[in-house]
Image (cartoon, rainbow, N blue to C red):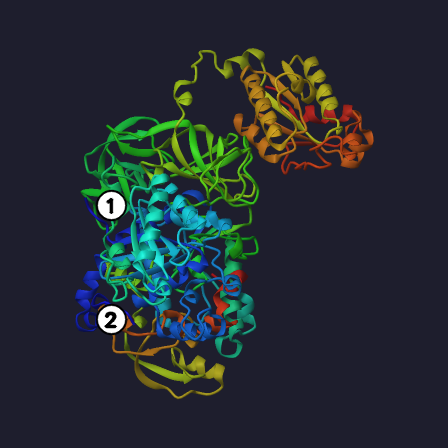
């Protein structure tokens, strides 16, 4: 008798989900955001299909505002995993010069929400893996592992398919697609624990280091590209070197840095367990539209 | 805050993070559900568990405090329920509609809680939550005792195979922590539980709101209570997954991994038992045996794997094995059958259609299946057996089920993973039902296919033609029979062996016991499909002329036949034209209300989406339509 640990059970469940998708979908893709959840999801995919490489490409819906260190790791992981890496830029957002400073929520909508829809339509993907977890946010807690989207990518929370046992219904009409969340039942602590146990490479920005920072609208941010920052803002903000790290990674002008001394995985986990603010708090995105921010975004097609 | 020293983990985290992480890494996982209505304090209890196990952060707490004052139901105190009622609509209405999954952990275990809605109209949601749970917490309001809903929730939990039930008598603070109240409720519950076959349960007096007997027991308010706290019980109860390891080895094959010519791995999640390198296995249903050559993982080969793990096996011999097959212990393989008695929980607004083909998914097998008229429906409040012709949304009933090919299974009582299935509507693709296999019907085991020496190909070759079923569909009076008759005449002149099955003629004989209800119409088409198939097996070109208004039934017949032999011919005559013709005077009667369920009037006609041939009797004469059809089906051999 070998009682499995919770991490072993979570791993087995995620691998089972990924294999179901590959067996039943015509053209799956893995959404890859380069963050720690993506890192775990990619690692699980490699385990699920070993010794073959995962039989689907990675898709990065880029905003051009990600941290440099993220772009570096993205290229490296694609090489190591032997998977094709697809990068999508929303041309319209680029032409209109949409950026996080001047355009606020429109930046996320154009680059991410619209960009994602464009990319899925362009390649005709009928199933897309995403790294969302149910513990992240209230509306996620009720989302299915296999989440159906209409041909226009909308999500209808009142009309979700029941998921019983470990049976996932992957049938869909032409044009419809599925967003699949293999990490649904993982918590933030599980993710860190697994990164540690499996020695998974993550972006160094998760670890504290002296970095150039500036303050903007009451938050602390890292000046990842000072020249570009100056160009957009019209002036050079005051830059100070501070020991900071990030709890989540997105666009650098939208991702708040936290002052920290946690330079190792164990210290990061320690800090996470002892701090008392939730993970998404550093992100500006959830606060739009009151408490229902994420639910509203998802109905519009955001991942 | 009522906290036991066990939850003072901060010190350990701060002082020795390594030790803490080691402890967390080796935790087990227990999944449970909480059921009860909103009034029983279910969401409050879950909020309390999250709160007491430090799963709520300061910013969430701040939001919770302000929400509590704004829309909470607890006055100025924190309303924990607001933490877990996630969707905007639910927050507005103050009710829990869907299943929400929550996570918390203690020193010993990590927990996944499925928070299930309590009202009868959400039975399907509770069934969903219960399907993966090891344990159920049944909440009872101490002031109200065992209610109809308590019985319903207990019945569903038991039906879904949950072996551990906790009767949480909540709101003890509102009855002055009176032992008498608790004992009376427990006695009443025991009497009922025994009646429906629940062998044991654990009763705990709690207050989700005040925190009594949640993390430590006994609370100062219940010195008379000698049992464990709710958390202590959750930390020690046996996990179903561990119990599954004692059974014979089973692994449904999900996917075959062939990265190169030298490697052929079978990927799957082990549902039961354990496996070692070298163990003898049998691939079912085919029955070929081999042995395990290796258990391959990314981190190296394993010597052994157990139920609950996703693995990749390679076998010593080159034998056929693909998705839908099962690799099982060679000496103790699972059963195979195509007819079952099952319990079905209906989950769709559109009622079950007995006889209609649905997709059935069980493990990694997906087959076409149909359900007979239910033997009975179970009243989920009184457990009486009610007569039923169908099952409506949230109904639970027992029926016979037939699959179009044999499937590998275990009775649900022996294995939830291999005895539980879902039913999928073939058109909407929605999951419309869930079921649990009781047993295989003996009938199926004893009726074996009779092997024949003269095959259908032999029949066809002798007749010098390719068997076909020309399936005419359209409204009454559209011209189906007339055109089919004309086509048959031409085929006859071309020396082809044909037979025309006509709607009215069949209803005088084979199907004279059937009426015109939706269920009877489905059975009507099923029988005609079977007869047409036998005739095609005999090598004939079969022509059928039936309204056959439902896409699902036409597709059912299509799937009975080899690819390319079913030719759907849509006689596309508008209703106004067919009604104007009214050859048999039926439209007039239907309009006058003398004829019920008449297609086009008070029963729908679902037009074919991709018929092989379409003819139109407004623009074409009967002869032109017949010519068009003949041209389309050439060559005939």
Residue B528, image quadrant:
top right
Chain of residue at mark 1:
B
Position of residue B92 measured from the top left corner of the image (x, y, whole percent): 53, 65
Q: State whether residue B479 is above or below residue B490.
A: below
Query: Would you name the residue on which mark 2 appears?
Result: A270
Position of residue A184 measured from the top left corner of the image (x, y, whole percent): 38, 56
Which residue corresponds to the image point at 53% horizontal and 40% vertical from the top-left? B425
**Placement of the C terminus of chain B among the 4 image quadrants:** top right
Contact? badges 2 and 1 (CB < 8 Å): no
Position of residue A26 measured from the top left corner of the image (x, y, whole percent): 47, 45
Q: Is residue B275 left or right of residue A240?
A: left
Which residue is more in the foreground, A33 or B342? B342
Query: Would you name the residue on which mark 1 appears?
Result: B242
Which one is in front in this view, the residue at disc 2 or the one at disc 1?
1
The outermost residue toward the front is B180
Do we see residue B619 in this rendering? no
Tell me the crowding category of disc 1: few under 14, some 14 to 19, or many 20 or more residues within 10 angstroms, Cα based: some
Q: State whether residue A177 is above or below residue B460.
A: below
Q: Which secondary structure, mark 2?
A: helix
Chain of residue at mark 2:
A
Which residue corresponds to the image point at 36% horizontal and 28% vertical from the top-left? B336
Q: Which secondary structure, mark 1?
A: helix
Q: Is residue B579 left or right of residue B361?
A: right
Which residue is more in the foreground, B528 or A195? B528
């Amino acid at each position: 008798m070998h009682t499995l640990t919770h991490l072993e059970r979570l791993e087995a469940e995620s691998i089972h989900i990924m294999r179901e998708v590959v067996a039943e979908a015509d053209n799956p893709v893995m959404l890859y955001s380069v963050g720690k959840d993506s890192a775990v999801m990619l690692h699980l995919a490699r385990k699920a299909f070993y010794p073959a490489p995962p039989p689907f490409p990675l898709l990065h819906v880029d905003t051009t505002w990600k941290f440099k260190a993220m772009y570096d790791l993205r290229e490296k992981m694609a090489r190591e995993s032997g998977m094709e890496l697809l990068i999508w830029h929303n041309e319209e957002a680029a032409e209109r010069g949409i950026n996080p400073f001047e355009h606020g929520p429109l930046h996320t909508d154009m680059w991410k929400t619209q960009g994602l829809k464009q990319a899925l339509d362009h390649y005709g993907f009928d199933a897309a893996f995403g790294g969302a977890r149910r513990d992240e946010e209230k509306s996620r807690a009720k989302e299915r592992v296999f989440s159906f989207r209409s041909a226009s990518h909308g999500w209808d929370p009142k009309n979700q398919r029941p998921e019983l046992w470990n049976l996932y219904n992957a049938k869909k009409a032409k044009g419809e697609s599925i967003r699949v969340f293999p990490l649904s039942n993982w918590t933030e602590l599980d993710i860190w624990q697994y990164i540690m146990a499996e020695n998974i490479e993550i972006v160094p920005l998760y670890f504290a280091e002296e970095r150039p920072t500036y303050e903007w609208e009451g938050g602390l941010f890292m000046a990842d590209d000072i020249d570009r920052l100056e160009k957009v803002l019209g002036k050079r903000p005051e830059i100070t070197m501070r020991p900071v790290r990030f709890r989540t990674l997105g666009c650098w002008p939208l991702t708040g840095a936290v002052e920290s001394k946690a330079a190792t995985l164990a210290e990061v986990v320690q800090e996470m367990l002892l701090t008392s603010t939730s993970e998404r708090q550093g992100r500006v995105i959830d606060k739009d539209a009151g408490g229902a921010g994420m639910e509203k975004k998802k109905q519009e097609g955001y991942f | 805050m009522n906290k036991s020293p066990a939850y003072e983990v901060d010190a350990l985290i701060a002082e020795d993070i390594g030790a803490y992480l080691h402890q967390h890494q080796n935790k087990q996982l227990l999944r449970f559900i909480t059921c009860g209505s909103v009034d029983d304090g279910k969401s409050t209890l879950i909020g309390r568990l999250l709160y007491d196990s430090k799963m709520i952060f300061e910013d969430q707490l701040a939001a919770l405090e302000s929400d509590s004052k704004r829309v909470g139901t607890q006055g100025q105190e924190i309303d924990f329920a607001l933490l877990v009622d996630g969707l905007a609509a639910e927050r507005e209405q103050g009710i829990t509609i869907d299943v929400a999954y929550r996570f918390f952990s203690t020193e010993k275990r990590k927990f996944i809680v499925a928070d299930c809605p309590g009202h009868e109209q959400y039975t399907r949601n509770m069934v969903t939550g219960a399907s993966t749970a090891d344990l159920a917490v049944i909440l009872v309001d101490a002031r109200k005792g065992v209610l109809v809903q308590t019985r319903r929730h207990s019945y569903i939990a038991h039906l879904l195979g949950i072996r551990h039930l906790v009767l949480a008598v909540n709101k003890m603070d509102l009855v002055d922590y009176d032992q008498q109240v608790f004992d009376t409720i427990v006695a009443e519950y025991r009497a009922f539980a025994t009646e429906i076959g629940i062998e044991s349960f654990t009763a705990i007096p709690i207050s989700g709101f005040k925190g009594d007997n949640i993390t430590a027991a006994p609370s100062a308010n219940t010195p008379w209570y000698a049992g464990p706290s709710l958390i202590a019980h959750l930390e020690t109860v046996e996990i179903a997954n561990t119990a599954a390891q004692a059974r014979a080895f089973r692994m449904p094959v999900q996917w075959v991994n062939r990265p190169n010519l030298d490697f052929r791995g079978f990927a799957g999640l082990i549902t039961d038992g354990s496996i070692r390198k070298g163990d003898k296995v049998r691939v079912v249903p085919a029955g070929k045996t081999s042995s395990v050559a290796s258990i391959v993982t990314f981190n190296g080969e394993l010597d052994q794997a157990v139920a609950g793990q996703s693995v990749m096996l390679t076998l010593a011999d080159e034998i056929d094995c693909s998705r839908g097959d099962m690799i099982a212990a060679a000496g103790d393989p699972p059963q195979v059958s195509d007819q079952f008695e099952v319990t079905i929980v209906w989950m769709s607004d559109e009622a079950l259609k007995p006889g209609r083909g649905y997709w059935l998914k069980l493990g990694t097998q997906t087959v076409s299946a149909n359900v007979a008229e239910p033997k009975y429906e179970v009243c989920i409040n009184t457990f009486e057996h009610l007569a039923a012709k169908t099952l409506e949304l949230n109904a639970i009933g027992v029926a016979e089920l037939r699959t179009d090919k044999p499937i590998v299974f275990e009775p649900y009582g022996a294995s939830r993973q291999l005895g539980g299935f879902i039913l999928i509507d073939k058109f909407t693709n929605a999951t419309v039902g869930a079921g649990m296999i009781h047993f295989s019907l003996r009938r199926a085991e004893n009726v074996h296919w009779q092997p024949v020496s003269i095959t259908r190909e032999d029949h066809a070759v002798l007749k010098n033609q390719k068997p076909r079923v020309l399936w005419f569909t359209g409204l009454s009076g559209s011209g189906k029979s007339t055109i089919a008759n004309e086509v048959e005449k031409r085929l006859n002149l071309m020396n082809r062996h044909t037979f025309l099955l006509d709607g009215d003629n069949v209803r005088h004989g084979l199907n004279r016991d059937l009426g015109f209800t939706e269920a009877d119409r489905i059975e009507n088409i099923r029988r005609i499909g079977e007869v047409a198939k036998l005739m095609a097996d005999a090598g004939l070109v079969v022509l059928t002329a039936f309204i056959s208004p439902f896409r699902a039934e036409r597709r059912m017949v299509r799937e009975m036949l080899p690819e390319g032999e079913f030719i759907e011919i849509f006689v596309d005559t508008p209703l106004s034209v067919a009604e104007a013709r009214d050859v048999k005077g039926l439209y007039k009667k239907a309009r006058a209300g003398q004829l019920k369920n008449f297609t086009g009037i008070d029963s729908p006609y679902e037009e074919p989406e991709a018929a092989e041939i379409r003819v139109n009797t407004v623009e074409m004469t009967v002869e032109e339509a017949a010519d068009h059809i003949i041209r389309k089906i050439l060559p005939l051999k």
